[in-house]
Image: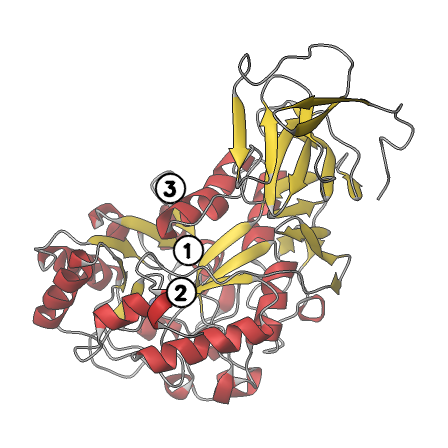
Amino acid sequence: MYRRNAGVRQPRLLRHDNILFRDINRKNIVFPDRVPVTSLENSMTIWSGADLICMDRRPALVLANIQLPEGRRADITIRDGRIVHTGAGEAADVMIDCTGLFVLPAAVDVHVHMRGGSQSAKEDWTTGSMSALAGGVTVVVDQPNAIPPLTTPEAFLARVREAQAHSFCSFAINSGVTPDTPIEAMWAAGAMAFGEIFFAPSSYGEALGTPELSSVLGRIRALEGLATIHAEGVTPGEDTGLATHDALRSSEHEREAVLAVQACNTSDCRIHFCHMSTAKAIDAANGSVEVTPHHLFLSREKTGDSNSRFKVNPPIRNERERKALWARWDRIDMIASDHAPHTMAEKEIPFPDAPAGVPGVETMVPLLMAEVLDRRITLPDLIRKTAIAPAALIGIPPAGYTPGNRADFALYPQSAVTVEPEILHSRCGWTPFEGYRAVFPETVILGGTVVYRDGEFSRGNPAWFAGKGYAPQTRQV
Ligand SMILES: [Zn+2]
């Protein structure tokens, strides 16, 4: 860290409308009736096109010498968790020189299973959220198939309290959906979205049938909520290895499940398809589409057939399907990890009995950053699919480079390392991506505060993002 403006001359002070301004350049002084003014939460004022910044408080953080994706260099000034100015930087409490680093809006992972409670041996909010931060993710959306499942307001609010007490990153929590779930009460309790709604049997999940799904989608539509769907079809049978697991939950089954979901969505509810694993299913989907790193990077040819560590739903496919998935890159709206930590001891048992799911929140962006370094994908695409689109999906303020944006960033070096379990932070203690190339962030900023730097964590001010239906006057959290 350094203070670039340490030697700056004493600025001249101006007063206008009871706001004190500093004239940085001693020129181009224009008053608000002449220049567009943006007021942000009444605590700061920026004049676009002029180097004038409200002086009532010093900015907390300046990220200096950022290379913006469009190529321009700029300093970003942050106060109260938001960007207040992009351009020439101000003197600040903390300045970070970003020369030579990729400065990315931090990722939002809309699909994690943070465990905790009776499943704390696998993961809890502390280790799961540290794992997220160390992978450049500052907001996670926790899935409701926890133990107990989040299908009552009481269970939901207990989960919120658990996360508020322990999480190092910001979070939102979804409501579970069964035919008996009080959907409207879950919405009022602060559920961000509904689901993942299982449209097939899976670990801990009870699948809904077509009539139940149709009715539930109608109720979610009435709330103007979002339904997130785990769409799979399953042929009964024993999965003795990854090939039979794949055959029992085939790409054709996945496609048919997508079509069946859409056919029973007679109310035109907003639908998001979780972890689509095949090009066929993506081609059939007319909602937003999420894909995981394990379906983009792993195939049976790479993992071997009988390794139960790689058992996950939907299954790891073959190399041909994996390449076809990459060919749909432009149609894929966002990447989410489906972080589902199980311990090695739980996974390394006979294949049919092994639980489905792999960890991945910490490696999601780093694996994709290695693809950026190798010029197989572009940085703007990565930012769109890991930060902008997921924030828009759940309706939270976007992280980014312009005034008003949420000040969550991850700073990446321009070199890759090899993924080893020892460098990761999930309690489950292993990764399906061992040996893969990845670029991990050096520094992560949450709400304008450095919360992770060179392996050290500090707890900043993580937020709970409640859904649009949250009615706090009736709920005590
Ligand atoms: Zn799922």
| Mark 2 / mark 3, whichever is N-terminal | 2
Q: Which residue sits at x=55%, y=36%?
A: 379
Picture layout, residue 118 above or below residue 319:
below
Picture layout, residue 240 above or below residue 61:
below
Q: Residues within 10 Å of mark 2 (few under 14, many from 20)?
A: many
Q: CA distance from mark 2 to mark 3?
A: 17 Å
Q: Which residue sits at x=68%, y=12%?
A: 29
Image-quadrant location for residue 184: bottom left
Determine the secondary structure under disc 3: helix
| Mark 3 / mark 1, whichever is N-terminal | 1
Q: Amino acid at mark 2?
A: Ile
Q: Position of residue 404 (x, y in %)?
A: 53, 37
Is the residue under label 3 in contact with that under label 2 (CB below 8 Å)?
no
In the picture of the structure, the residue carrying the numbered disc 3 is: 327
**Nearest to the observer: residue 282 or residue 94:** 94
Q: Position of residue 253 (x, y in %)?
A: 20, 64
The colour scheme used here is: secondary structure
Q: Residues within 10 Å of mark 3 (few under 14, many from 20)?
A: few
Q: Amino acid at mark 3?
A: Ala
In the picture of the structure, the residue carrying the numbered disc 2 is: 316
**Nearest to the observer: residue 337 or residue 1:** 1
Does residue 465 appear to the left or right of 179 in the view shown? right
In the picture of the structure, the residue carrying the numbered disc 1 is: 319
Question: Which quadrant of the render holds ligand 1?
Answer: bottom left
Q: Quadrant of the C terminus?
A: bottom left
Picture layout, residue 189 above or below residue 107:
below
